[in-house]
Amino acid sequence: MIRVVAIVVMLALTLPGHGAWADPAATFDAQGYRNASYRAVVDRDPVPARRIPLAEARRLHATDKALFIDVLPAEGANRDPVSGRWTLATRHQSIPGALWLPDIGSAAPDAVMWRGLEARVAAYRQRHRRAAVVVFCRADCWLSWNAARRLALSGVSNVRWLAEGIEGWHETGGKLVDAQPEAVPNPGP
């Protein structure tokens, strides 16, 4: 009986719509954002944002000529909607000086968090008009791809995507520091 069930399962996985035949378009929404399986090989650039080589990102970071934005989710954390402050379940390390705005790379980011990102980018750009905005997460992570693309499509210029993410930064000698998510309160009534 177990063999019969195993054979049926194996055959089902080879049918169109399953396993190797699964529709890759099903993991993207109508606007082209990845909406499932965020931790997977990223096989394209987040046009109109551009990929930034790790060496260039490190040079920009050393000269303070870019705003770095970490979009890694805060696993198991809670955000107080009134204060916008986060209670973390686990520690997170990120690139020094980066703003951590969890979950804004999902296909449908939280509107309040997205407005918080836009406000921080606008404030930074008032002081540094042409500076790059470098968006990252982990290596092989579509969350940073989504966020970089959405930010560039919203009209922000010079948005760059650091595909190697936190791991690539650290593996090439880059320092990591403990990070706290940016507090983004809900707007008042």
Image (spheres, grey):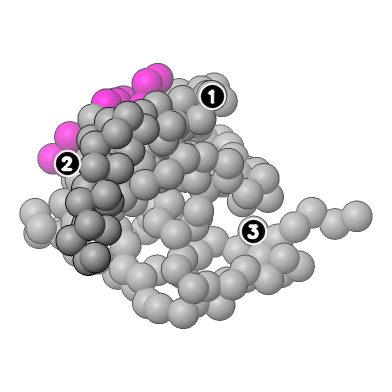
Image quadrant in which the N terminus is located: bottom left
Q: Secondary structure at mark 1?
A: loop
The x, y position of residue 122, in whole percent, is 58, 37
Which segment is the magenta one? 44-56
Report the residue at 46% width, 79% height from top.
Answer: 89
Q: Are marks 3 and 2 in contact (CB under 8 Å)?
A: no
How far apart are the alpha carbons under marks 3 and 1? 28 Å
Q: Is residue 46 left or right of residue 76?
A: left
Q: Would residue 116 be visible to someone looking at this image?
A: no
Left or right: 95, with 76 as reference point: left
Along the horizontal axis of the image, is 138 left or right of 185? left
| Category of crowding for the residue at label 3, using alpha-carbon neighbours closer than 10 angstroms: few (below 14), some (14–19), many (at least 20) | many
Q: Which residue is farthest front? A: 1
Mark 1 highlights which residue?
Answer: 30
Tell which of 16 and 60 is nearer to you.
16
* Residue 55 against residue 166 in the figure, above or below: above
The amino acid marked with disc number 2 is Leu
Residue 79: in magenta span = no
Mark 1 / mark 2, whichever is N-terminal? 1
Residue 48 lies in the magenta-colored region: yes
Amino acid type of the residue that numbered disc 3 sits on in the rendered structure: Val
Residue 184 appears in view: yes
Q: Which residue is mark 3?
A: 184
First in sequence, mark 3 or 2: give its number: 2
